[in-house]
Image (cartoon, coloured by chain):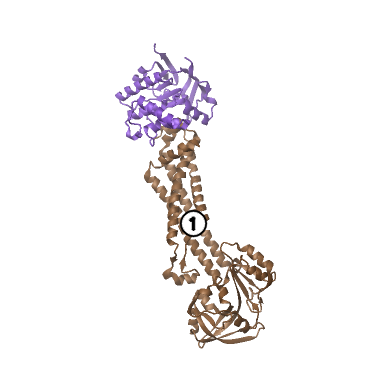
Amino acid sequence: MRVLSILFPFAWRNLWRNKRRTFITLLVVAVGVWSILAFNSVIRAWSDSALVGSLRNMTAEAQLHAPGYRDDPDIEHSFAVPTGRLAAVLNSPMISAWAPRIRTPAIIQSEYQTLPITLVGIQPQRETGVSFIADALSQGQALRDGNDDGVLLGRHLAKRLNTRVGKRIVIMTNDAHGKLVQRGARVIGIYAAEPSLEDRYLFTGLKPAQQFLHADGLLSEIALMTPAQTPLDPVLAQLRQAAPKLDVAGCAELQPMTKGIHDLTEGFIYVWLWVMFVLIAIGVVNTQLMAVFERTREFGLLQALGFRPGWVELEVMLEAVQIIGFGVFVGALFAYLTVQALSSGISLGGLSAGADFLGIERVLYPRLDATEFFITIVVIWGLGVVTALWPARRAARFDAIEAMRSN
Amino acid sequence: MPAILECRQLVKQYHQGDTTVEALRGVDVHFDKGEFVSISGPSGSGKSTLLHIIGSLEQPSKGDVILDGVSLAQETRQQLADIRLNRIGFVFQAYNLIPVLTAAENVEFILQLQGVDAKTRHARSAELLHEVGLDGLQNRKPGQLSGGQQQRVAVARALASNPAIVLADEPTANLDSKNSDELLALMSKLNQVSSATIIVATHDPKVIAHTRRHIVLTDGRIETDETKAA
């Protein structure tokens, strides 16, 4: 401890012998750390937005279906409105929101066009926090409740059908008994979402949809969300216990592609971290080696004066601890300030059409996760110091006489 | 006077490819406490090698150095570092001060490593810098001092921890005549004041004239070892 207290200020002074080199090293470390943390928060905001967007499209975090529905999404594969143990689990604090739906492939017809769609009967209040439809209205009015027999069309679908709010359309499909049924309905609202969603989904109240399909009291699916930071697997396990005859699937199973892209983005963040870290390490090792070879004579002198070899190594390591620590601090501070400055949201502005297409929101909200922030700092600092071991060992191995003969 | 330092049959060989160079060929010599000794000889005679082996900076190929009853050949690298820190002072031809430390800090550095408290350290460095005539320059860094002043700081540093021996390798080689005279007078005075044995490797006749005992090395062997009458 005594030696450390002597060598710490000694190392600090040595660090500033070559101010230019020290500033360059500081810059490399600080920019590296800043880019890792700031870039990470933006990419993560993008990735999370894409995932949330995708989940909110219609998938949610998990769904319950009748067995076979996922292979053949037809009204024949339906199940009864939940009661008893399943209802208790769905209404427990481990689930933040859940929405019952009935959905079936159908045909929609306007005066001008006939197109395939998916008819979805919903309870609009329950869709809040579960799917996009709760806040996607762009024209007209939303569904009042699950008894509302009006329909909501996607903006693009309305355009293709050449219809608008207030006009009537005809829906045709097979009912629960396999018979062809059709009914007229008034378009009460137009919603805006991803183009593929706008083309695909037509929403109406759950009750009128059940009646239309002759499926009173039946559902095609229940979509659910959990509170933030809640691990999904235990929730799925509880649901499977509560409804052993239903097919309970998480989002990774329902949308493997989306999950895969999210995981790939996470992987990219780590690749970026390692690329930047390698750059930092090269910078640190180079500078430390230069500093060591410039001071070869001095290391010989220190040994002659009674420095133990370990103290020489410790001195060089302390220089690395200080310069990397300082650089990491500066980089982390700027990253924090950058993310704070962007925390009110990065508007994708003119890219909004592209954003819709990619399924991300139009405003990204970068944030720094405290645990991840500190772990990144500690890992970069720690690994950076480890890379300085090599130059430090070189310095400790100098032969005192040979070292003092060098210029 | 008891012998503070004994060199027993020191042999040092350097291998350069297939060639073996013998820098020391069986040097047998002892030094008493408080002696002021000069070692001279032509270039390549082994003066510096002898000094380095005595200072435990190099290991002999054969033979041993006994410092105050301790065989240096038996010591580990770390123990030898501790011996240099506590028992040996060095003065080099090229001053070799630590550039980031002031004159006072250079003197105090070894005391600091020895664990001497700050008050004692400051007092000791002030006393030594006064002795070497550098009052008022204690806060200057080596780059702000002349060659002669730097060498005086190096002498003060060498004596800071009251070492048993002080080894000086060509201490006047980089100094002008005036500074050389002043440094020699200073070393003589400090030799009398302290109990340290001072061993100087030199070509300089003035240095030899200041020492009571003079050893001449030729081809790695002691040619003469003379002590002037008191």
**A210 and B168: which is toward the camera:** A210
Residue shown at 49% from the left, 42% from the top: A390
Secondary element at tag 1: helix
Residue A350 seen in this snapshot: yes
Label 1 Cα neighbours within 10 Å, binned few <14 / some 14-19 / many ≥20: some
The x and y percentages for residue A164 are 48, 84
* Residue at the extreme bottom of the image, as rendered: A111
Q: Which of these two is toward me, A105 or A96? A: A96
The picture's colour for chain A is brown
Label 1 belongs to which residue?
A272
* Three-letter code, disc 1: Trp
Residue A89 image offset from top left, x and y in percent: 65, 68
Using the image, determine if residue B224 lies above or below residue A2.
above
Residue A325 vertical position relative to residue B32 in the rendered view, above or below: below
Q: Quadrant of residue A254?
A: bottom right
Number of dots carrying numbers: 1
Horizontal and vertical percent position of residue A193 = 50, 74
Q: In the rendering, at what x and y percent does residue A338 appear? A: 43, 58
| Vertical relation: A72 (above or below) A258 | below
The quadrant of the rendering that contains the C terminus of chain B is top left
